[in-house]
Image: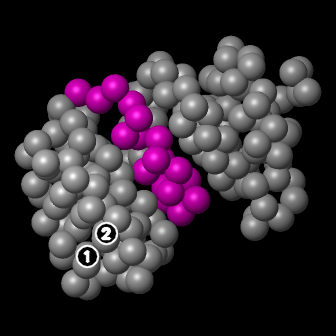
């Protein structure tokens, strides 16, 4: 599998399945030089490949966030242009792991605020979580996000309210 193109591993099958994305996670964690190939799959013409590549990149970067740093500009650009909801969910988890400058964090936060208006509940919830994650490195953003969380508790979807309750607990614990 070490020489098989990652896009080939990720393609095919049912949209409701992650296919072999966990195999790709294992592959890129052992063969870090293949991570750029995985990242390039985020721009695939095949929506299944994009979705599964995002899942694999998110899982690999959860274990080794430093894998993402060389792709900061590309990932921030993708965040602006992406519209596939599965890609948006995963970018919401990936982007806060990047070593962002204050202006980049502000730009990302603006995009994640727009997620809160998305038609998909999971995208809205992912956006809220991403804003909370970004606010860990930004006091001004933190107070804004706390207000957003309180607003979501009053008027969000069920999934958003559940996430907001957990985030509010984290915010309160962090302010002690």
Q: Which residue occupies the foreground of this view, 81 or 175? A: 175
Residue beneath the point at 48% across and 69% down: 122
Q: Is residue 43 magenta?
A: no
Does the CB distance between marks 2 and 1 fall below 8 Å? yes
What range of the chain is rendered magenta? 82-101
Q: Which corner quadrant of the image does residue 9 belong to?
A: top right
Instruction: Point out residue 86 in the picture as x, y percentages from the top left corner.
Output: 58, 59
Question: Which structural element holds mark 1?
Answer: helix
Q: Quadrant of the N terminus?
A: top right
Mark 2: give few (<14), some (14-19) or many (20+) Cα within 10 Å: many
The answer to whether 148 is drawn above or below residue 38 in the figure is below
Residue 152 marker: 1
Residue drawn at the location 62% of the way across and 34% of the way down: 60
Secondary structure mostly seen in magenta is: helix
Considering every residue shown, the one lying at the far top of the view is 33
Residue under the image location 49 percent in, 55 percent down: 88
- Answer with left or right where residue 2 lies relative to residue 124: right
Q: Nearer the viewer, mark 2 or mark 1?
A: 2
């Amino acid at each position: 599998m070490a020489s098989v193109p990652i896009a080939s591993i990720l393609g095919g099958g049912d949209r409701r399945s992650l296919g072999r994305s966990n195999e790709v996670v294992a592959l890129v964690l052992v063969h870090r030089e293949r991570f750029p190939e995985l990242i390039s799959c985020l721009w695939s013409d095949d929506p299944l490949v994009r979705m599964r590549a995002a899942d694999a990149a998110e899982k690999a970067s959860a274990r080794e966030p430093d894998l993402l740093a060389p792709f900061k500009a590309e990932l921030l650009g993708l965040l602006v242009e992406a519209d596939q909801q599965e890609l948006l969910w995963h970018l919401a988890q990936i982007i806060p792991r990047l070593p962002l400058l204050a202006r980049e964090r502000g730009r990302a936060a603006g995009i994640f605020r727009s997620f809160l208006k998305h038609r998909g509940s999971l995208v809205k919830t992912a956006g809220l979580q991403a804003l909370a994650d970004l606010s860990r490195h930004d006091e001004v953003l933190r107070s804004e996000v706390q207000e957003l969380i309180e607003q979501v508790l009053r008027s969000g979807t069920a999934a958003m309210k559940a996430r907001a309750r957990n985030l509010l607990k984290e915010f309160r614990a962090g302010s002690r």
